[in-house]
Amino acid sequence: MASKNYKIAVIGGDGTGPEVVAEGLKVLKAASNKFGFKYETTMFDYGGDRYLKTGKTITPEEIEGLKKFDAIYLGAIGHPDVKPGILEQGILLATRFGLDQYINLRPVKLYKEEFTPVKNKQPKDIDFVVIRENSEGLYKGMGEFRDKGTKNEVAIQISYNTRKGVERCIRYAFDYCRKRNKAKKLTLCGKTNVLTFAWDLWQRTFDDVKKDYPDIQTDYAHVDATTMWFVKNPEWFDCIVTDNMFGDIITDLGAMIQGGMGIAAGGNINPQGVSMFEPIGGSAPKYTGKHVINPLAAICALGMLLETIGEDKAGKAVEAAVIKVATTKMKSLAAGKMGYSTEEVGDLVASNI
Ligand code: IPM
Ligand code: MN
């Protein structure tokens, strides 16, 4: 049977984005040779440099154009010469929303005890997945200023939560937890004691949906307590489902306990459409062009991409190669301290596929 020819859109983006994506593409080539699937990449220049030249972030037509791909591979968005918010909203969030990537999937997995700053925690203790709602909440951009610039100014920022939006996220989380088949436990992370509209809806929806998943154990944790337990008892978690803002915050902490931004990857998933995979660290401008940035996060994102498009074995092989290189070769996961250059780490992973 002829294998499928995957069409992959590549957005290197800003700062170190293009460098880490280049290493991911090396690994993609090695995986395709080993597992016999075909692919074709198309490069896009969306990012800060193009914005500074043309004033364009990403247009609705360009987002439409991304719909014909099987997946999108993204480096990083964020440029030191562009005011914060313009590129993030105009490119990253515009694409997440435009392609209705309503799940942000962020695995938190420790590969070696030495990589975590948390004392006495081993790889078996830090291994969970955060399922972050990725299309609503405080990210919706709803709100207003009143009496702007006066001493009576009021700024209102609305958290927008729909039953449909919350339910599709929670269902995805239950399905994911079942398929992961580990502790089979899903924790709802929220703030029911204060945010009594949004979290009432989340809690009721969670309680309704869980009836369809009697095999999954459920739990609830307030978001503030969740950050405490990430440090104190991360072994309590298997899968966590939460809203957009809380998910953003807790996954930065998650990245730290798994070894830092050099290893943390995520997927913006539309289960019925086109998904986009990215290292979750930013564009790291100060390391641009220095050959010191850790490409493993981008390579892990590539592994997630492969698993999602249906190349499960290739995705697992990428993760296994990352684990091997990270645990047996590298001195550290931090930029400049790896004991290897960015390119050498990419070569090592590719040769271990
Ligand atoms: C992330 C980032 C983005 C977010 C920013 C860059 C808009 O922090 O992917 O977590 O807040 O979602
Ligand atoms: Mn973030």
Image: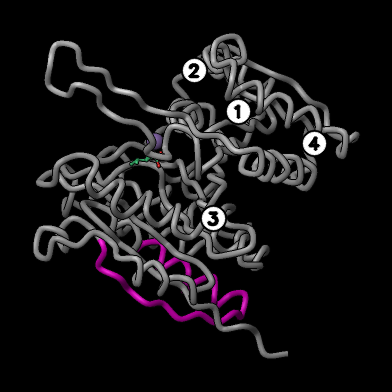
CB of mark 2 within 8 Å of CB of mark 3? no
Quadrant location of ligand 2? top left
At x 70%, y 19%, the residue is 220
Q: What is the spatial separation of the Cα atoms under label 1 and label 2, in whole angstroms?
A: 10 Å
In space, the residues marked 2 and 3 are separated at their CA atoms by 25 Å
Q: Secondary structure at mark 2?
A: loop
How far is the residue under mark 3 from the one under mark 1?
Answer: 19 Å
Q: Is residue 115 visible?
A: no
Identify which residue, 133 or 162, lies in the foreground: 162
Residue at x 26%, y 46% (from the top left corner):
283
Q: Kindly identify which residue carries mark 2.
A: 118
Look at mark 1 in the image and give the residue it sits on: 126
Q: Which residue is mark 4?
A: 209
- Residue underneath mark 3: 321
Question: Identity of the amino acid at label 1?
Answer: Ile
Q: Which residues are magenta?
A: 22-46
Q: Seen in the image, is 292 located left or right of residue 235? A: left
- Give the foreground label among 3 and 4: 4
Quarter the N terminus occupies: bottom right
Mark 1 or mark 2: name the one nearer the start of the chain.
Answer: 2
Residue type (three-letter) at the residue carrying disc 3? Ala
- Tell us which disc is closer to us: 4 or 1: 4
